[in-house]
Amino acid sequence: MNELLWFLMLFLDFGALLLLYRYLGKTGIFIWIPIATILANIQVLKIVQLFGFTATLGNIAYASLFLATDILSENHSRKDAHLAVLSGFLTMLLTILIMTLALAFQPDPNDFVQESLKVIFGFLPRVLAGSLCAYVVSQFYDVASYHFLKNRKPGTRWLWLRNNLSTLVAQLLDTLIFTTIAFYGVFEAPVFVSIVWTTYVLKALTALLDTPGIYLAKHWFQHNKIPS
């Protein structure tokens, strides 16, 4: 059942991004970036069983950020892709700051959500540092790598290569940075290694499944179906 829901979420997240791009152009992508950033950081708290692995949710929403910047890199400019990365980073940072302040308010005796909010937004310092560092490094690497490959292998023929190669390496960097900062020394070595590789396997699978999305975005752009 979880696997069916996972594919449904994949279709919904990637579909939402592509529809926003189709009808709102670049603006649609900049609308999706903060939505996916917030969703990814909330969903990652939920642990599920997927394809025989113990995993967290949030991988699909997070992967859609790479698809978003790849679309901007392919159809628009490196500047637009960098702006999208910055938008996501500021969304994460401001959400953390604002919700940390919100949690500091003394709740009314009739309040019933404070403890639940603490669970969701009571960020542990190591997890917080790992998330921010991993996001910045992996996203800026993805943009740089995409344009490096685009300059050397231009044209639609090599679209699959620059999309997949840049994202797969970026997701590996993201996984290594986040898990090392957040969990190294917390778990024994075999458990830590298991967390790293199972996390990356699911991220890599999600990254590969976004390939039809970038081809569809390219098709729309080439046929002048994207609002300017």
Image (cartoon, rainbow, N blue to C red):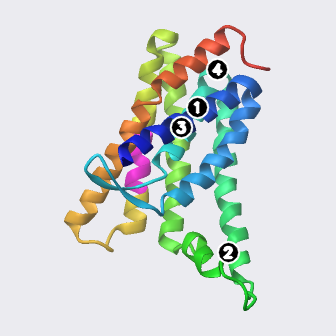
Reading the chain from its start, which is encountered first: label 1 or label 3?
1
**Furthest residue to the right?**
228
Task: State which mark lies toward you, 1 or 3.
Answer: 1
How packed mark 1 is, by other alpha carbons closer than 10 Å (few <14, some 14-19, many 20 or more), is some
Reading the chain from its start, which is encountered first: label 4 or label 2?
4
Residue 202's quadrant in the figure? top left
Q: Which residue is mark 2?
A: 100
Please, is residue 217 above or below residue 196 in the view?
above
- Part of the protein shown in magenta: 169-177
The CA span between labels 4 and 2 is: 38 Å
Instruction: Name the kind of residue labelled 3 in the image.
Output: Phe
Reading the chain from its start, which is encountered first: label 3 or label 2?
3
Circles 4 and 1 in contact, beta carbons < 8 Å: no
Q: Residue at x 34, y 47 (%)?
A: 200
Q: Secondary structure at mark 4?
A: helix
The CA span between labels 1 and 2 is: 32 Å
Residue 195's quadrant in the figure? bottom left
The CA span between labels 4 and 1 is: 18 Å
Q: Indicate the position of residue 14 as horizontal and vertical percent values.
A: 55, 34
Task: State which mark lies toward you, 1 or 2.
Answer: 1
